[in-house]
Amino acid sequence: MYEIERSKRASRAYSFDDVAIAPTRRTRSEEEVDLTWKIDAVSFDIPIVAAPMDSVMSPDAAIRMGELGGLGVLNLDGLWTRYEDPQAQYDLITQESDQITATKRLQEVYAEPVKGELIRDRLAQLRDAGVPVAGSLPPARTQEFAPVLEKAGMDFFVIRGTTVSAEHVGGEDTLNLKDFIYRFDTPVLVGGVATYRAALHLMRSGAAGVLVGFGGGATHTTASVLGIQVPMASAVMDVAEARRDYLEESGGRYVHLIADGAVGRSGDIAKAVACGADAVMVGSPLARSTEAPGRGWHWGSEAWHAALPRGERSFFEQVGTLEEVVVGPSRVPDGTMNLAGGLRKSMALTGYTDLKSFQRIELILL
Amino acid sequence: MYEIERSKRASRAYSFDDVAIAPTRRTRSEEEVDLTWKIDAVSFDIPIVAAPMDSVMSPDAAIRMGELGGLGVLNLDGLWTRYEDPQAQYDLITQESDQITATKRLQEVYAEPVKGELIRDRLAQLRDAGVPVAGSLPPARTQEFAPVLEKAGMDFFVIRGTTVSAEHVGGEDTLNLKDFIYRFDTPVLVGGVATYRAALHLMRSGAAGVLVGFGGGATHTTASVLGIQVPMASAVMDVAEARRDYLEESGGRYVHLIADGAVGRSGDIAKAVACGADAVMVGSPLARSTEAPGRGWHWGSEAWHAALPRGERSFFEQVGTLEEVVVGPSRVPDGTMNLAGGLRKSMALTGYTDLKSFQRIELILL
Amino acid sequence: MYEIERSKRASRAYSFDDVAIAPTRRTRSEEEVDLTWKIDAVSFDIPIVAAPMDSVMSPDAAIRMGELGGLGVLNLDGLWTRYEDPQAQYDLITQESDQITATKRLQEVYAEPVKGELIRDRLAQLRDAGVPVAGSLPPARTQEFAPVLEKAGMDFFVIRGTTVSAEHVGGEDTLNLKDFIYRFDTPVLVGGVATYRAALHLMRSGAAGVLVGFGGGATHTTASVLGIQVPMASAVMDVAEARRDYLEESGGRYVHLIADGAVGRSGDIAKAVACGADAVMVGSPLARSTEAPGRGWHWGSEAWHAALPRGERSFFEQVGTLEEVVVGPSRVPDGTMNLAGGLRKSMALTGYTDLKSFQRIELILL
Amino acid sequence: MYEIERSKRASRAYSFDDVAIAPTRRTRSEEEVDLTWKIDAVSFDIPIVAAPMDSVMSPDAAIRMGELGGLGVLNLDGLWTRYEDPQAQYDLITQESDQITATKRLQEVYAEPVKGELIRDRLAQLRDAGVPVAGSLPPARTQEFAPVLEKAGMDFFVIRGTTVSAEHVGGEDTLNLKDFIYRFDTPVLVGGVATYRAALHLMRSGAAGVLVGFGGGATHTTASVLGIQVPMASAVMDVAEARRDYLEESGGRYVHLIADGAVGRSGDIAKAVACGADAVMVGSPLARSTEAPGRGWHWGSEAWHAALPRGERSFFEQVGTLEEVVVGPSRVPDGTMNLAGGLRKSMALTGYTDLKSFQRIELILL
């Protein structure tokens, strides 16, 4: 904590770009590195979760993500649950050339209501494919569709908003998170959360995992619009400390920590784990895959807010299949392909063989 | 305070871009957020004051600003009090394509003297519209037009210069600020001021509010020309400390603090309040509104100085009506529309419901 | 002093861009500001010295500089003392369009030897004009032309190199600075020097003034080529401390301190004085005047080194007469015109009326 | 060490751009500066080692480097040991215009196996030229070609990987470095290494010198792909500390320290030595010489990794012969020619005459 003026204190915060992993005195062979992780009853080959964004996750892409050993989360508040066949809407969004009319188009397309039966059908499609089933809603929609979700047989339910607190004080449709999680059968992942105290309260609500971040990454402009910003390296480290304290306080409940934001390259994934994350949630790198329904265009849920849009629609060159992007091989030298391979190599070169111990590696401040 | 060389000390100063607001453990519904503030006898719906700059405030625009729940301050040292109908002058200024001839044109257009009767007429127009009436003059012009101002029935008189001190030592037309304020009926807002000590002296002169800043924001080049610069986050925090000390010293006089400079996006407004401001004075965002008389061109009073111009004429794309810019809805994701909405959302997401308590939120150093 | 690794210490250094002048609680009228300064027997209206660079100082320009109240220093190691009429050489240098051939051309043009009789004639021209007479040589040339200089009747002799130390250990033509100054009638200004210890030794050699800086400003690439760099704000503050200690040690000899480097705008001049300089030596701003013989092209003596050129030939748009650049009025808002006016305004707005006390103003770290 | 969050510590690290050399109170003549250094039985005129990269070192270029007084290291894992005449492969690599297909081409061209007899022939060619003979292999290839290397009569064998540790725990082809060096006749230089602890272990393995760096310089993207990064100034200083401690621990074994990475200009060479390096290994500056086989195109071994390429193919304008680039004269002002001359001048201007004492010069933090 710094005293920045006579009357204010502030803590210095670091982004992934402000820190780096330092080599140690050991190296390992890549074959010895184990990237598996487990949350609740489900094991994954790689700690990579696809963000529930319409630009990257269609039902098909979510299934493919599961087949690759990761987890694809479908946006249940998006195009696939508002429209029977959303192709026309995708076309509308991606055809606009300038930002202002694109924002307008997004606002229009997302004005269509979400349908419970489409939530049911989309989740059934994932389940039938035999991959882990996960879908997400914002806090305000959770109560409304809880009955549908209950019957859907999901492996994970993700409650994802710009920020989610355990103590939302609000209007009628306010979600009592603790109550909801207690009564809900499926394990819940919830976020974004970015600070120690907020994370601790969220953990106490019974969540199986928390999404660490605030307002996402490349496509969001939260800092400009709201002035709120939590650089990710500090956020992950801070929430990891909350996990440690909660582990003791709860007598052994380990809450998983998924870094959600500013994870655009494999080097960022390595840094996220090095800061304490168990897994990462990625968006923009997947927008570069040929399976992404946005065909390179990428936007988040903040981008279509009716009165205060807070995200830009961005374009990313498509570079290869979802498989190549996630598990390689890579054809580009910038860390946007073979995300798992980059993490594996980073761990090998610093002498680590499992994710949990890699969380303790020393960092450098740049 | 740092010792930067053997013989000098300096304090580290922070701009709005150097700090950010951190989420807390609570969130609130936007409907619960109250943005009203009150200064002297007048209440406002939103803590947004339009800067007395000819590029953004015509009498009509000032009236519209009042209707929207903010305060429009008319520049009484500008085109509307030098010319009966300044449209030809606006055309001259905005038609020039390069900076050097634009500066020359500004110097010529503003060589025309200010007329007392135009001050009277413009203020009457505001008063007749039923909105709060406010106009501004630089310190050197204040004495000369005091009699006209006295009769004008303003709600606020703004004395605004690059920097204004309570102890100007100077020539014949020197304004004795304390004397002036004591004898003047209308509440006075005065600035810019940027440091604890200068602010404390200004508060002791009896001002109802102080403008915090030095040399303004985007369109000024004070740092290059004068070497003087006070990053806004530090300036607001420092002056807020002076307000606190003066509150005790005076036995309860609360001087309002209006952040005037570097407030270009709604995120900056949130940061200004989080640093301790009661309201903000904005210029460039309003230049983007269709009501701005500069039609996108934006300049400050420093830009037309006869011997030492210190501001550039800038161009901003027009994005919507003054209403859309100030209270939304927004169609752009960068924080330049729906300024009040951005502040409201920022407060809701961090669990605050009134401006006064939001001033105490914790900050992060980036 | 910071310990940056186990085995190294380093001090943090600041450039003019890293610091700013803070307003105080007082303001003054500009008319009260006194910019005069005096070194040895000569008084100047403004603390601005023109750098001895062929791109900005011809004999005519040096005379004009003196008429304007400053000091023009003629480069006695340059084109005007190598060629009877150097116009053809100026044309050769300024006609080349790319950097590599321009460097080659500079290397060729400056291969011509310096002539003693041209030194004599050029200095006579200045003397006849009735302005203060000053010329410069690098340390290695000083001994050779000392006899000519002795007879020339200069007011100041400037020994200027990339760096000049009081303890040069070297070949046959090594200058014993202390000896030279002791026997030489004319007051000597010598530099560049950039650190406390080196400055203290230089002051003990009897110099009337020191040039603070290392390798100059905009047109030099010393940092890239040599790895040596001393940010100017720290350099000036450090040497000012040496001046203070030497003043006591010598029982009252005040050595003048001329900031020589990175002074490109009037704001930099204000900062240089605020850091402790008595005057500044400027190059690039003068390259923008119509009297500059380089007609906008600007280069330093490092640029034509035969084996290791260390400066680029840069181009600056010409904006006005030397008078307008130095004492105004200005037509541009970026601090490159009316250099003296910018300094005057900066002092007035912070409540100072003379240069000596302005050296004590508080600084801000950005 | 800083505590950056409750649970993490990190040390601040500096790049060459973050530090600078400060002038001292002495200057020297350039003729007095001695740039020679000696490692094992071999003396060199200049402390500049050419990096074993196919883009800059052909057998002919390596010979020329030796003739110029430096050391040329041939890449024994590259084009010259995979192909009898690699010209066609050079053409393939340099003809591709975009990065993605260039990476693909690199992956294909380097799929061809290395041949022992070509290693033998290339080294013989160097030996026959009468210059110091040095070649490099990555750790994984060292064991396989050890017999060939033994017979080749090299002066130095360089084991060079992204990172090399003394304790690689791995598969069958794992190199036991200590064992290998103990039994191998030729002095071994090994790296990259970037931290105190890893360097100390490497020194204990018996290496004659260590390469300080991680993942190289301009053409590598290790930070983006792996998240691993060690700014060079800190790395060199840290490893220099290990050298000092090992010198004591070993009773006098001095391990040479070669800075390998981010050395693109002569100023960086001076900084590397000032941080504690005995010599530097350079790549990109040599790519600008007419002798470079890549004809301006430059790439490292990471660029052709089959599954995780980590370097870009870059282009550098060719500026002169290898002689001009390494020992001058220079025709450019940016520090990319006359590398030795820049170092010599830097030492002269700060009063140093030999490399060993220049390692102790004071640094400045920018």
Image (cartoon, coloured by chain):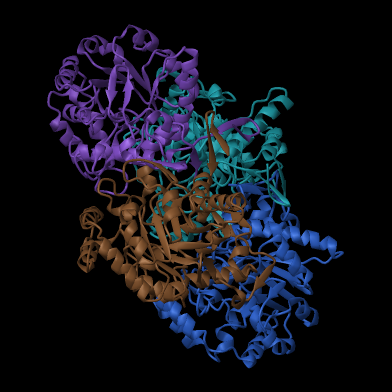
Chain colours: A blue, B brown, C purple, D cyan
The quadrant of the image that shows the N terminus of chain B is: top right
Question: Is B362 on the left-hand or right-hand side of C333?
Answer: right
Placement of A301 over or under B202, stated as above or below: below
| Percent of width and height locating residue A213 | 63, 65
- Which image quadrant is residue A201 in? bottom right
Please state which of residues A194 and D130 is positioned toward the viewer in this rendering.
A194
Question: Is A196 on the left-hand or right-hand side of D363?
Answer: right
Residue drawn at x 25%, y 37% is C327
Placement of B354 over or under C267, stated as above or below: below
Number of dots carrying numbers: 0
The reply to whether residue C79 is visible in this rendering is yes
| Percent of width and height locating residue A21 | 64, 50
Residue drawn at x 34%, y 9% is C180
| Percent of width and height locating residue D298 | 44, 48
Please state which of residues C362 and A195 is positioned toward the viewer in this rendering.
C362
Placement of B174 over or under D185, stated as above or below: below
